[in-house]
Image: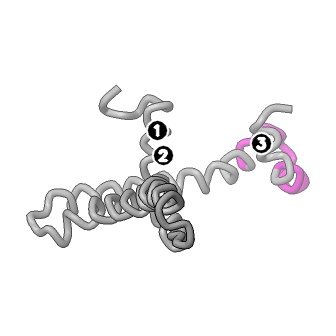
Amino acid sequence: MNFIDKLIGPVFDVINKVVPDQDKARGIAFELATMAEKHTQELAKGQLEVNKVEAASDSMFVAGWRPMVGWTCCAGLATNFLIIPISNIVLALTAPEVVIPVIDLTAMLPILLGMLGLGGLRTVEKIKQVSREI
């Protein structure tokens, strides 16, 4: 059983009871299965247009917010995984009673993963060879 059959199998069983023609039923089931992907792609295209308009703006508050969020996330990760551990090693040698706690990243990681998720869509474009820079 291939991936498409696994994806549309349950839907096909229901449609098969209503539509007697196997080919037509399979086509309807496949269209329903791909509808969510098409909708997600349309949303991503709309977001890309918004991103282009924002990036072209002369205002730092419009064009600069994404880089600022990205650099803030990078600073948080660098602090949590480089600066604090190295500082704790130095403190362990000089003042063993002092330990700097790591930062709780649960608020920052969804933002970072959301930004990286948009970058992941770019990878899908390159794999499907619809990217302009291939």
> Residue at the spot x=38%, y=57% of the render?
74
**Percent position of residue 37, x then y:** 58, 51
Q: In this view of the protein, which residue sits in the foreground, 14 or 69?
A: 69
**Percent position of residue 39, x then y:** 53, 57
**Percent position of residue 121, x then y:** 47, 46
Q: Which residues are magenta?
A: 12-28
**Percent position of residue 79, x then y:** 42, 61
Measured in 3D between alpha carbons, the distance from the residue under mark 2 to the one under mark 3, in whole angstroms, is: 30 Å
> Residue at the spot x=46%, y=38% of the render?
123
**Majority secondary structure of the magenta segment?**
helix
Seen in the picture, residue 61 relative to 19 is either above or below; the reply is below
Amino acid at dot 3: Arg
- Check residue 26 in the rendering and tell me which mark sits there, or answer none: 3
Q: According to the image, label 1 marks what residue?
A: 123
Within 10 Å of disc 1 (Cα), the crowding (few <14, some 14-19, many 20+) is few
Q: Foreground mark, 3 or 1?
A: 1
Q: According to the image, label 2 marks what residue?
A: 120
The furthest residue to the front: 94
Please tell me in which quadrant of the rendered image residue 76 appears: bottom left
The colour style of the image is: one colour
